[in-house]
Image (tube, rainbow, N blue to C red):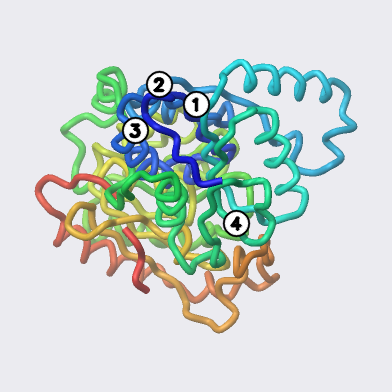
Amino acid sequence: MNRRPEPAEGRLLVVKLADMGDVLTATPALRALRRGFPQAHISALLTPHCRELLEASPLVDQVLTFGKRAFDSPSGLLRPGSPGELAGLAARLRAGRYDALVLLHHLTTPWGAAKYAALATATGAPVRAGLDNGRGRFLTHRAMDLGFGVRHEVEYWNAVVEALGAAPDYGPLELSLRPEDAAFAREALPPTLPGPRIVIHAGSGSYSTARRWPLGRFVELGRLLVQRLGATLVLVGGKEEEALARHLARTLGPSVIDLAGRTTLRQLGAVLRACDLFVGNDSGVMHLATAVGTPVVALFGPSNHRAWGPWTPGRAGAPALVLRAPLPCSPCFYVGHGLGTPEGCPNRTCLQLISPEQVTDAIQRLLVSRPAHPVAAGRPDS
């Protein structure tokens, strides 16, 4: 039950079937694994969309992918072709001959726990480490899950690898960029652009759109940034967020560069690194900004800022501010050991109470305090 996988055994599988921000919050734990088991072969099982976050990274030796969204509910098992997909995944995992499974997921629902228990069995790994909230009986090495926000996600994933014997790493999030990514950013953002380059992300991904500050507030914010700072506004987001960016671009005029839906994840990382500041909702793009060392102003409403706020570990990280209204009902999403209310309440008062003037003031404070050479991404204190 307590056998530690020795580096000589050499084959570890890290499972993080989640979105971009979740994968990035796991990178300090991956760094801890790499240091703790320097001779190990480390594979990561990710969703296809997140593959490029780690495929150029020295933290892993191999990236495997699986489209887990189809199996987010039990009805996915009834889909035509699903038995073949699952059998194919099981065969790939068994062929990996893994010595240890490192599960970086909360076992939030009975269905989720059942899925990951089945995955653990499919690997055949004798050592299985993860978080336990009472549903982790299939794990051999457990870290206690105290609930969302009691510890930051970065701290939870470090607790899991620590259970295996690796020393935790509370340093910044990490993203490896290639020269061609930097070249893309140089072309997209020529050096002649006026004023500070401020990235605006009005989206939040496709899950829980309740996290979004009202679009009209972003319009007001953009106008203030142009008027007060002479800023160049860089709009970013995924394909599903292009309409938000197009509206802002039409409304705000010539001070805007619209890159939403036009970048890969690594190209987006390079664009963020080339800018002076990021402002946006709780999202994977926010974590991407912290990972490349760009100062962040993050807007939080229903979601749990103590679990997913920008990770800026002391002097090692770029500065970040979390803006939120401290209402007794907030956060209402990912609280305790449950999901809570992903779509918040109809009024979303917690977001309505954040004003464009407040956000502008926070941006000005961070621009003044920005270090000459920012590095990367720590725990929000507010």
In primary-sequence order, the first of circles 4 and 2 is 2
The vertical placement of 6 against 278, above or below, is above
Left or right: 225 with respect to 159?
left
Tell me if mark 4 has few (under 14), some (14-19) or many (20+) residues whose alpha carbon lies within 10 angstroms of its own.
many
The vertical placement of 49 against 178, above or below, is below
Tell me if mark 1 has few (under 14), some (14-19) or many (20+) residues whose alpha carbon lies within 10 angstroms of its own.
some
Q: Between marks 3 and 1, how big is the CA–CA gap?
A: 23 Å
Residue at image mark 2? 61
Q: Residue furthest left?
A: 372
Q: Inspect the image, locate mark 2, and give the three-letter code of the amino acid beneath it.
A: Asp
In primary-sequence order, the first of circles 4 and 3 is 3
What residue do we see at 24% from left, 26% from top? Answer: 186
Task: Indicate the secondary structure of the residue bearing disc 1.
Answer: helix
In primary-sequence order, the first of circles 3 and 1 is 3
From the top left corner, tell me how far across and down residue 122 is, in percent: 69, 28
In primary-sequence order, the first of circles 4 and 1 is 1
Q: Inspect the image, locate mark 1, and give the three-letter code of the amino acid beneath it.
A: Arg
CB under 8 Å between discs 4 and 2: no
Q: Inspect the image, locate mark 3, and give the three-letter code of the amino acid beneath it.
A: Phe
Residue at image mark 3? 37
What residue do we see at 35% from left, 62% from top? Answer: 379
Q: Inspect the image, locate mark 4, and give the three-letter code of the amino acid beneath it.
A: Asp
Q: Between marks 4 and 2, how big is the CA–CA gap?
A: 27 Å
